[in-house]
Amino acid sequence: MSGEGQQARHVAIIMDGNGRWAKRKHLPRAMGHRKGVEAVRELVRSLKETSVECLTLYAFSSENWKRPDEEVDDLMNLMRKFIKSDLPEFIANDVKLHILGDWQALAPDIVEMLEDALERTSKGSRTLAVALNYGGQAEIVAAALKAAEAGEITEDSIAANLYTAGLPPLDLLIRTSGEVRLSNFLLWQCAYAEMMFTDVLWPDFTPDLFKQALEDFAGRERRFGGR
């Protein structure tokens, strides 16, 4: 398929580099995470100016629990503040929240806040999917088990039981901060997604850089295994 003029419907981002951003500026690591939340806010606001129907963000992996307790606590508190402060804006801008991962294992008050947010944004036309307590390998195992319970295990039956079921196929994966790996994120969904890696640290990733990434994607040729 020629890439000329194609538009990305579903983009996922591995938001990497908050800690390094803070270190370079001689700031506490927590400040990097807070600046990273601001970058999320600005990017979500800019979605209405793009072709993107679904933006998926890797917010907290199942491996992130290994980080120091203080950092995990700060990330969870940031999540609480973000949901509380930005939910009205999501509703006003017709943004639908979708959660990927074992998010119901989070703290009870966060689960309650997320359930409320999911319900109140359910009519949105553009989706913000957030991966919380997420691991790609665990997602595939869980989907295969559900498929087996229902009948035959096939590519279609597994796909129908992934956290992303019902979302557009993944078109583009972006990772910031210069790291070049998937880190157990959307392993199944990335099978034929285009990938883009940038040295820009996540807090410095702007809506303009996002639009540049979409323009780059529009010029790529996608063959999906063909010639």
Image (tube, rainbow, N blue to C red):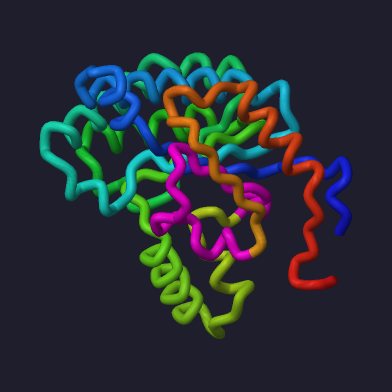
Asked if residue 227 lies left or right of residue 70, the reply is: right
Extreme residue in the bottom direction: 152
Question: Magenta includes 66?
Answer: no
Residue at horizontal 45 percent and vertical 79 percent from the top: 149
Give above or below for 222 relative to 66.
below
Give above or below for 46 relative to 102.
above
Residue at horizontal 62 percent and vertical 49 percent from the top: 167
| Nearer-the-camera pick, 145 or 198 | 198
| Nearer-the-camera pick, 45 or 201 | 201
Magenta region, main secondary structure: loop
* Quadrant of residue 106 within the rendered picture: top left
The quadrant of the picture occupied by the C terminus is bottom right
Q: Which range of residues does the magenta coloring cover?
A: 166-191
> Where residue 57 sits: x, y (%)?
48, 39
> Where residue 95 sits: x, y (%)?
58, 27
> Where residue 194 sits: x, y (%)?
66, 53
Asked if residue 224 lies left or right of residue 175, the reply is: right
Residue at horizontal 81 percent and vertical 55 percent from the top: 221
Give above or below for 164 relative to 21.
below
Residue at horizontal 50 percent and vertical 62 percent from the top: 187
The quadrant of the picture occupied by the N terminus is bottom right
